[in-house]
Image: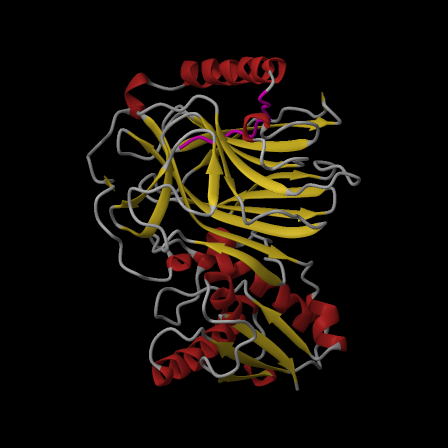
Amino acid sequence: MKKVFVITGLCIITLFANSQILKKVTDKVKNKIDPGVNKPESDNTTVKKDEKAPDVDTSKTQQAPVGIKAYSKYDFVPGEKIVVMEDFIQDAVGDFPDKWNTNSSGEIVTIDKNQGHWLMMPRAGVFMPEFIDSLPDNFTFEYDLFCIHGNKMGGWGTFQTVICELSNREKIQEWPYEHNYYVFSVYGGNADDATINYTRKKNGTPDGGVQIITHQVADKNKPCHVSVWRQKERLRVYFNEEKVLDIPKALTSDVNYNSIIYAQPDADEKNLYAISNLRLAVGAPDTRNKLLTQNKWVTHGILFDVNSATVKPESYGTLKEMATVLKENPDLKVKIVGHTDADGNDAVNLDLSKKRAASVKDFLVKEFGIDESRMQTDGKGEGEPIDKNDNPAGKANNRRVEFIKI
């Protein structure tokens, strides 16, 4: 799978300009890759449109094991409060999701060996989650991306993620780039790599450079986890454990970015992209201040395998943040408390929350050398919710780990 960061508009001039950029990137990649590389090795990734996936928490999509050391430079820390969680479980397979809009078409599918529902976008067009209508100065946005090329990861199609300002969200034919936007694109070539390209438009005028990076995808039969972190004008983008972009002046401070849109300018039946597990969180994580002055830090950035206390590698950035605070304050002691949502059996959830807190402590001891005598653990199961348990975002907020100063 190849990834490129690009900005396109619906106006003819912008489309033409970006198509020229993509053509150059395509030619460059084609000239460097053996023609046989993109041929499917075996048909072991199957898209299914006619069956219902199990009703599970798809924010915990199963992945092939990834060594925790691969994330040693991963510094992504999710925002403080989850405001959007989209896993498409409420949508029937074969339908276009109710809470989205498009000038094209798409449908909910299941993908073999991957949990949950996915929105597949088989035709060129733009696709907007209508429930995202404001983007503050500090937010994080995550999603899982599957590139399907002949039922394989990889392909030559372009898939764009657009952070933009829309003056009228109802005028679908004018989406998405009227005046101000920033786009980064996944541009697949070799099934194992991705080329990354980005551009920016400010006040109706292209304003921004093009940066080309090659990224290695660990497993072409698994989705790539994309993480976006905005801090005012600065924008960081991560593919799995690797930071692929870190642009200090990517966004414009006086622009009211209010939408995130996905776009495909050149989709066809051989180059399909599917997304799931969208998560938008707001607020700047302030570990040190919260723990030292408010005596507690709550994080949703420590993730676990399904029904397990095994810490996921993508939790590394959050745990590193906590370890740094503990190292800089050698007299600080904390209680680590695990919490779950209300799904499942109460007693099982209580036991699981205790085990997860213990796993976090063990991780801090083994990976960062924190003295275990400085940490206590406990679990509250589903007993102390901070949000409703009747929607995906509320459940995601309730699944958390707390560090309490003692």
Please report the bounds of the magenta region as a residue range: 1-10
Nearer-the-camera pick, 322 or 275: 275
Q: Position of residue 117 (x, y in %)?
A: 34, 50
Question: Would you place residue 358 above or below residue 151 in this image?
Answer: below
Residue 260 falls inside the magenta stretch? no
The number of callouts visible is: 0
Locate the C terminus and report the quarter of the image it occupies: bottom right
The residue lying at 38 percent from left, 64 percent from top is: 305
Locate the N terminus and report the quarter of the image it occupies: top left
Residue 175 occupies quadrant:
top right
Q: Position of residue 218 (x, y in %)?
A: 39, 42
The residue lying at 56 percent from left, 75 percent from top is: 386
Question: Would you place residue 279 above or below residue 292 in this image?
Answer: above
Furthest residue to the right?
A: 254
Q: Position of residue 92 (x, y in %)?
A: 31, 49
Residue 291 occupies quadrant:
bottom right
Question: Would you place residue 200 above or below residue 134 in this image?
Answer: above
Q: Answer yes or no: is residue 191 visible.
A: no
Nearer-the-camera pick, 340 or 64: 340
Q: Answer yes or no: is residue 258 visible.
A: yes
Q: Position of residue 361 (x, y in %)?
A: 51, 76
**Colour scheme:** secondary structure
The residue lying at 48 percent from left, 83 percent from top is: 383
Magenta segment, prevailing SS (helix, strand or loop): loop
Residue 5 falls inside the magenta stretch? yes
